[in-house]
Amino acid sequence: DSGVTQTPKHLITATGQRVTLRCSPRSGDLSVYWYQQSLDQGLQFLIQYYNGEERAKGNILERFSAQQFPDLHSELNLSSLELGDSALYFCASGEAPLAFFGQGTRLTVV
Amino acid sequence: GQNIDQPTEMTATEGAIVQINCTYQTSGFNGLFWYQQHAGEAPTFLSYNVLDGLEEKGRFSSFLSRSKGYSYLLLKELQMKDSASYLCAVRSSSNDYKLSFGAGTTVTVRA
């Protein structure tokens, strides 16, 4: 158990809908990272938050957004969902140089 | 941009040794990571190299040559449970801790 908690574990939704994925980092970790892993691509970095502020941005679509709250949990919001958004979404936390991954949310868009 | 290459698949016999190579070309370098990922599960941290040389941790060792943009992960005394995908990842920036991942190497251990 990495100490990083993600909910829900599975999510099935229709195209055009909006979903929210939730992540609680390890106790004491200020950083949260979001990654997407689809079958045809490896792990792709989406965005990092540090103590409530956006720290780094990867290839995150404009339809996707994230935030980190004062209690340090983070939410990834995915809107106007497309079939191609079906993937495993991982959250990770940790301070340099390590990152520990949650179990992921498997999103299926139908 | 970031370019991280590793072989797609490798097969080895239980009890043997396997070496997974990773080459990288990135805009900066602040550390190389190896993760193990079983299908449908979270990546788990295996090793971290920031200086040249070999880091040994039990049955797993990782080597880094920064001048060659090259690393390898060595798995010794292979066990069936080692069948998994092994991901090479590079941290490029000193200002953040995002990782750029290779596509992963699927290792199959056969009896």
Image (cartoon, coloured by chain):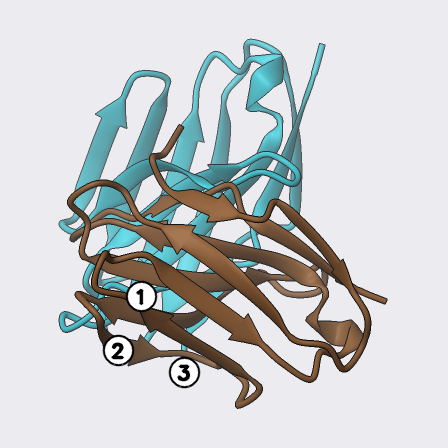
Total marks in image? 3
Residue A87 percent location from the top left of the image: 67, 61
Mark 2–mark 1 distance (CA, rounded to whole Å): 12 Å
Q: Which chain is cyan?
A: B
State the residue in front, A77 or B10.
Answer: A77
- For numbered disc 1, what is the local secondary structure? loop
Q: Amino acid at mark 2?
A: Glu
Residue behind mark 3:
B1
Mark 1–mark 3 distance (CA, rounded to whole Å): 14 Å
Do discs 2 and 3 belong to a common subunit?
no
Which label was assigned to residue A54?
Answer: 2
Give the class, few, some or many, for how many residues have Cα within 10 Å of label 1's Cα (few <14, many ≥20). many
Which label was assigned to residue B98?
Answer: 1
Do discs 2 and 1 belong to a common subunit?
no
Image quadrant holding the C terminus of chain A, namely bottom right
Give the class, few, some or many, for how many residues have Cα within 10 Å of label 3's Cα (few <14, many ≥20). few
Q: Which chain is brown?
A: A
- Vertically, is B84 above or below A89? above
**Given this view, does label 1 or label 3 mark the residue nearer the observer?**
1
Q: Residue at point 54% right, 85% down?
A: A61
Residue A32 percent location from the top left of the image: 30, 59
Q: Amino acid at mark 3?
A: Gly
State the residue in front, B11 or A53.
Answer: A53
Marked residue chain, label 1: B
Q: Residue at point 26% right, 78% down?
A: A54
Q: Residue at point 71% right, 9% down?
A: B111
